[in-house]
Image: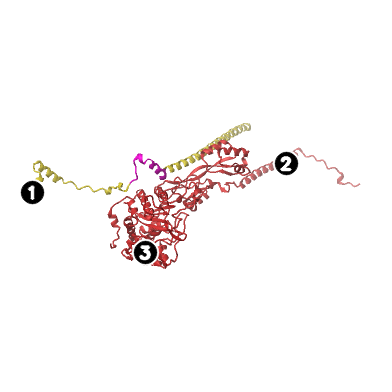
Amino acid sequence: MIRNLNIILIFTSVVMLSGVYALKFAIEHTASERTALIALIDSQEGDLSVLKADEAVLNQPGHIEPIVKRHQEALAIVPVAQKQFGAFADLPMRPAQPDNAALDALLRSLDAGVDPIDAILTSEGIE
Amino acid sequence: MAITAEDFAPTIALDGTRKVRGNMTQARLRWVILAIVLGFATVGGRLVQLGMIVPDNSIEGVARAEITATRPPILDRNGLEMAVDIRVPSLYAEPRRIIDVEEAVSKLRTVLPNLSESWLRSRLTGDKGFVWLQRELSPAIEERVMRLGIPGIEFLTESKRFYPGMNEASHILGSTNIDNQGIAGIEKHMDVEDVALLQDLGLARGNALTPVQLSIDMRVQHVVHEEMVDALTRYKAIAAAGVIMDIHTGEIVALASVPDFDPNDPSTALVKDSFNRITAGIYELGSTFKTITIAGAIDSGAVTLNDKFDARYGIRYGRYTIDDFHGKHRVLSVPEIYKYSSNIGTIRVMQAMGKENYRAFLTRMGLDTRVPFELPEMRLPNVPKNPSDISAATMSFGHGLSVSPLHMVVAMSAIANGGNYIAPTLYRRSLEEAQSEYVRVLKPETSRDMRYLMRLNSLEGSGSLTEKIAKGYRVGGKTGTAEKVENGVYSHSKDFNVFAAVFPMDAPQYALVVVVDEPQVEEGGLGTNSAYNAGMMSGRIVQRIAPMLGVAPNFSQALDDAMVPPNLIR
């Protein structure tokens, strides 16, 4: 009875021992992976900071203006002048509705062969 | 024969087997207990010893966290980066781990030939745990040094401050030293405020810091800076500076002063004359001061726009006679005094107000104290405390008192925004925040009268050259041409020129002050008077920046007519 128990205990401890060792190695592996990832993130953050700085330089008005000046002739561009600005509010109002009834009357009288201008010219004594 | 106990040999007593075994077990138990106690004591002692160790995190006296600490990025008002941190490798050595110093020296010098051999040798010899060799190197050099494979030579990633705008905003940003601490400008102010605290707490690591947003608009800043640099060649001036302020919120939109320096190379900041002329330079600002004098007199009620003053003759003070530069020598109304920039007229206006009242008004406008501002580079203005009659007379037209151009732009803002003094700031400030800080220094009616006068000067007076360039943007401004003091007397050949303006005058938004030191006649130009340099520079600046600031041109005569005060008799 006690012998069987001992055998079981020995087996259990061997299994647990190997389990603990496997766990240890797994953890060590994970830790080294983590360290590698941290180093990678660190270097990528470094690269990112340099790229961001690059982007900031390229976005500076002081960097863009010389480029614009260099290509001013080829692109035919000049700085905007005051008179080139406009706004919708500056547009003149639409003229009042055309007088459709008067136009119709005029066309009808022309169709009938009567040109109202003749009457005016006659009254003015031109014709 | 006596029998004594000594004569007997000890009695031989034999213990039983059981007893012997019992004793032996007890002895063994004691040994085992002793061994266990010793074992635990050793482990415990080692634990205590480990607990006692203070880890040395400092690098040559500076905490490691402080060196790797980052600073928050600085953005302009549109979110464009003005200062960012970049990660750079720095080379250090651990001399106690170096096996062959000579080999290390010769190998290192193949990659870094600028390091002196003897310096490197002395640096690598010894038992130190940490010495810097060279800081802030490029990743390419890091790669090459790592390839050498010298034991005890390592890299540490540091944060280095980088200013993508180079010179353009140098006087605003200031600079940082190699340990990433602010040594000038807003960088220094930020350290004093909160970054130093964050770094102390060890929180300033990684890129998680909230960016700091400034009130500067880099586009406007670029234009102003370019115009200032241009002035050095166009007018052969020794220096030029300009500042633009939002008159309602007090936000500084642009601030440039040349000669300047490259904040990426802090040693250039030590070059002579590259100080911030807007905040740390105090000057006699000449006729631009007439705006302030007349504003004070009108506000006191002693003078109205309809008053007339005798400007026929110069005013005598003992041996001195103060006369007008281009004198009309007749009786002048207040708008005429301003328009023709009459010294005599301005003195009369000041006298009508009283010199004590005038002096008190200067205090009210904050002209005799330091402007409350973030930049550490500030200078106290020089304004006589109890001016004599002649001193008060010269002060009225801007001589005999020295203030910074920043004082002038703040005063211009108060005059144009309806009479509220608002301290300038480099940080964002909303209109509501600004309004809660307003201090009323002028009546709204005075502000209205002054806006009319300033616009009038642009239409008919010394500001007409500016108006010609920036037509449509309704600039109102005053020129100032001050002769520089040389060996105690005013020089006739060396001027300090100023232009103080506000635009657009019908609904004022921005105040602008431009100063030029010792300008010469422009090629093909007509004179050294302020209108020909500071005035035209202001015109060019406004012409370029007004569209960026959302000010649309308007050529309508009605706007100018609407600015004429109703009580003015013409």
> Chain B takes which shade in the image?
red
The amino acid at mark 3 is: Ile
- A13 relative to B255, above or below: above
Percent coordinates x, y for residue B70 in the rendering: 50, 46
Residue extent of the magenta highlight: A59-80
Q: Is residue B310 magenta?
A: no
Nearer the camera: disc 1 or disc 2:
1
Q: Which secondary structure dominates the residues rendered in magenta?
A: helix
A54, B391: nearer the viewer: B391
Q: Position of residue B501 (x, y in %)?
A: 37, 55
Task: Tell me whether marks 1 and 2 sit on the same chain.
Answer: no
Instruction: Tell me the amino acid under the disc marked 2.
Output: Ala
Q: Which residue is mark 3?
A: B344
Mark nearer the viewer, 2 or 3: 3
Outermost residue on the bottom side: it is: B318
Report the front residue among B79 and A39: B79
Dot 1, crowdedness within 10 Å: few (<14), some or many (≥20)? Answer: few
Mark 2 falls within which chain? Answer: B
Q: Chain in yellow?
A: A
Q: Do the numbered discs 2 and 3 sit on residues whose CB atoms are within 8 Å?
A: no
The secondary element bearing badge 1 is classed as loop
Which residue does the image show at 35% across and 40% down from the upper left? A73
Amino acid type at mark 1: Gly
Residue at mark 2 to residue at mark 3: CA–CA distance? 119 Å
Image coordinates for residue A81, horizontal then vertical, percent: 32, 47
- Check if residue A64 falls in the magenta segment: yes
